């Protein structure tokens, strides 16, 4: 298919653009295969370049021959275009609708994008499972790399290489895979070097109503326990939901077959409930007519902060089991690709200082989200404005990023990255020139040949010129476990995401600049103090030598 077939009117003059925080500007609107571009001849006017894949929904209205298109973006921005001529307006609208809903992944921009920067690091090879395993293997010999999923035959949503207990062979793993939802047998997610406890993750066991069991599964998860120690299974579903899953062939670990494991049920919502929550929240944020009471009531009705609290509470529970109880943990929900990953990755941020650095956090996203099979293509296909109800969309990754922001806000000196880093990841998960978040699993990414045909987000982000934008000036390495508060008053709305197009961040930006200047000035003064101390020490030494006979 040629993009030209979808572009009925490639260019229109005298279009007026209205967008947040900029004055209205008149210019020429151009449509390309992947971008909507508006450029003006006015001096000091920034061009608008908008990826079609960032467009969530459009509305049209007409007054006489003047047409208006309102573009609602996946990053929650709303843009208005006033287009002279009804026919041009209708043509532009239908072209945008067609170009923003392309079915084929290979027609998306990452397959056409060519970097304008010098590529010094191949992000596709920055965080390989073998490298991650080396970090653990120096501390313990109880685990091994398994290549049982080399052709994605055992589990289509797992990567080709996984870390499993050394005492369990590949044949046993194949049997366990038939007993776990989607073939997702328990694999290592995190090894706590302080006490050797681990977090594992999997899909639900397929016990069904008959109480089916699998000896290999029991042996596998028991292999993670120390002698005389108990473990915890954290099921991210309520007991009621887990029991309903049994009737459909799923289920949970029976105490009779897993006597050394205590099961705890939490209640993290899924799919359409999360999507509806996001839609309600963004709608409330965009309505400027509310008084304070009505705004707070709509914020509460969205339940967004309730979801944040539930996810963080479960992650804290997992971290507590590891660090304070000295017990290993197995985490799963139904598929093990959504709430499971939220909990395993947040528990690591709480427990593991490396996950709070820029590269450590990138490795975490690569390992616990991309390689672990979170279906980004399905979950991020639409955002808060789309009218068509799809089954698979859900802001699972955005909720995770929001939880990370909540912890960052409570521990502002413990993270090497800043809020802008999290916002950038949100934007690229929904619309990007890079191939990192395309596809639903490693298997799909291999079939699409993303490593050969697209650029990795990490290749761009890890350039020194880009990293400086995302580095937290307050960072001081903290090797301790950090325990976030989940009290309602400790969990505010993330304004940097949800209110950034509604209210200017000018004063916050100025305050941030001032803070950076103070930190730099403090460093300069500290350097001078160190020089003066050295000079004083030298003078005292000289005096001492002169006084001695």
Image (cartoon, rainbow, N blue to C red):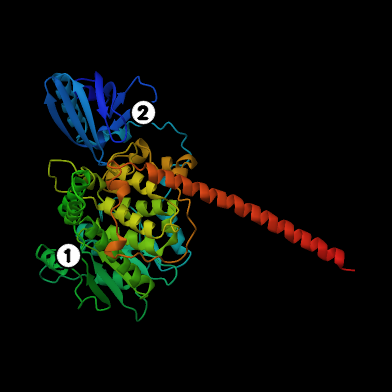
**Residue 540: image x %, image y %?**
77, 63
Identify whether 237 is placed above or below 41: below
Quadrant housing the C terminus: bottom right
Quadrant housing the N terminus: top left
Determine which quarter of the picture holds residue 437: top left
Q: Which residue matches tag 2?
A: 46
| Number of numbered tags placed on the structure image | 2
**Residue 4: image x %, image y %?**
23, 22
Q: Which residue is drawn at 26% across and 39% down?
A: 77
- Is residue 193 something that shows in the picture? yes
**Residue 241: image x %, image y %?**
14, 65
Q: What element carries label 2?
A: loop
Q: Give the number of the mark in front: 1 or 2.
A: 2
Mark nearer the N terminus (1 vs 2): 2
Q: Which of 350 and 391 is in front in this view?
A: 350
Residue 254 tag number: none
Q: Distance between the residues labelled 1 and 2?
A: 56 Å
**Residue 46: image x %, image y %?**
36, 28
Q: What element carries label 1?
A: loop
Q: Which residue is drawn at 42% across and 62% down?
A: 352
Q: Which residue matches tag 1?
A: 206
Check disc 1: other Cα within 10 Å, few if <14, some if 14-19, many if 20+.
many
Q: In this view, does 247 lie to the left or right of 142?
A: left
Q: Residue at x 27, y 63 (%)?
A: 488
Q: Which of 321 and 163 is in front in this view?
A: 321
Q: Nearer the viewer, residue 165 or 307?
A: 307
């Amino acid at each position: 298919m040629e993009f030209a077939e979808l572009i009925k009117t490639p260019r229109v003059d005298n279009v007026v653009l209205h967008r947040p925080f900029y004055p209205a500007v008149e210019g020429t609107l151009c449509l390309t295969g992947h971008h909507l571009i508006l450029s003006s001849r006015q001096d000091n006017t920034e061009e608008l370049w908008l990826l079609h894949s960032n467009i969530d929904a459009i509305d049209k209205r007409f007054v006489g021959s003047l047409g208006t298109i309102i573009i609602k973006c996946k990053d929650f921005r709303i843009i208005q275009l006033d287009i002279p001529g009804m026919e041009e307006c209708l043509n532009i609208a239908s072209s945008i609708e067609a170009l923003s809903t392309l079915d084929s992944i290979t027609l998306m921009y990452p397959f056409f994008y060519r970097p304008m920067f010098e590529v010094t690091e191949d992000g596709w090879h920055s965080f390989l499972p073998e490298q991650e395993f080396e970090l653990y293997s120096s501390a313990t010999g109880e685990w091994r790399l398994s290549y049982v999923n080399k052709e994605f035959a055992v589990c289509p949503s797992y990567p080709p290489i996984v870390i499993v207990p050394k005492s369990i062979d590949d044949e046993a793993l194949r049997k366990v895979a038939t007993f776990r939802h989607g073939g997702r047998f328990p694999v290592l997610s995190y090894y706590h070097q302080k006490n050797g406890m681990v977090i594992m993750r999997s899909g639900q066991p397929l016990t069904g109503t008959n109480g089916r069991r699998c000896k290999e599964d029991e042996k596998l998860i028991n292999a993670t326990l120390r002698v005389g120690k108990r473990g915890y299974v954290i099921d991210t579903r309520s007991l009621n939901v887990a029991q309903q899953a049994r009737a459909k062939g799923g289920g949970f670990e029976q105490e009779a077959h897993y006597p050394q494991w205590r099961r705890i049920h939490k209640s993290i919502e899924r799919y359409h409930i999360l999507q509806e929550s996001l839609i309600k929240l963004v709608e409330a944020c965009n309505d400027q007519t509310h008084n304070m009471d009505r705004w707070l009531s709509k914020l509460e009705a969205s339940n967004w902060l309730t979801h944040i609290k539930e996810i963080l509470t479960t992650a804290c529970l997992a971290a507590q089991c590891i660090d304070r109880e000295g017990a290993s943990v197995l985490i799963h929900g139904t598929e093990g690709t959504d709430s499971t990953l939220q909990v395993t990755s947040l528990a690591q941020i709480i427990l593991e200082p490396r996950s709070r650095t820029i590269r450590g956090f990138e490795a975490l996203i690569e390992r616990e989200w991309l390689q672990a099979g979170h279906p980004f293509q399905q979950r991020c296909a639409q955002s808060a404005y789309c009218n068509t109800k799809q089954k698979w969309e859900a802001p699972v990754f955005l909720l995770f990023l929001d939880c990370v922001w909540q912890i960052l806000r409570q521990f502002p000196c413990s993270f090497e990255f800043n809020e802008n880093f999290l916002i950038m990841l949100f934007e690229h998960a929904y619309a990007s020139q890079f191939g990192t978040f395309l596809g639903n699993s490693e298997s799909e990414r291999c079939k699409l040949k993303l490593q050969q045909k697209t650029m990795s987000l990490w290749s761009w982000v890890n350039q020194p010129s880009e990293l400086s934008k995302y580095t937290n000036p307050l960072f001081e390495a903290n090797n301790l476990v950090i325990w976030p508060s989940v009290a309602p008053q400790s969990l505010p709305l993330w304004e940097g995401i949800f209110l950034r197009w509604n209210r200017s961040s000018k004063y916050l930006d100025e305050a941030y600049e001032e803070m950076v200047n103070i930190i730099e000035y403090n460093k300069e003064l500290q350097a001078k103090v160190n020089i003066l101390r050295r000079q004083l020490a030298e003078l005292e030494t000289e005096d001492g030598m002169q006084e001695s006979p």
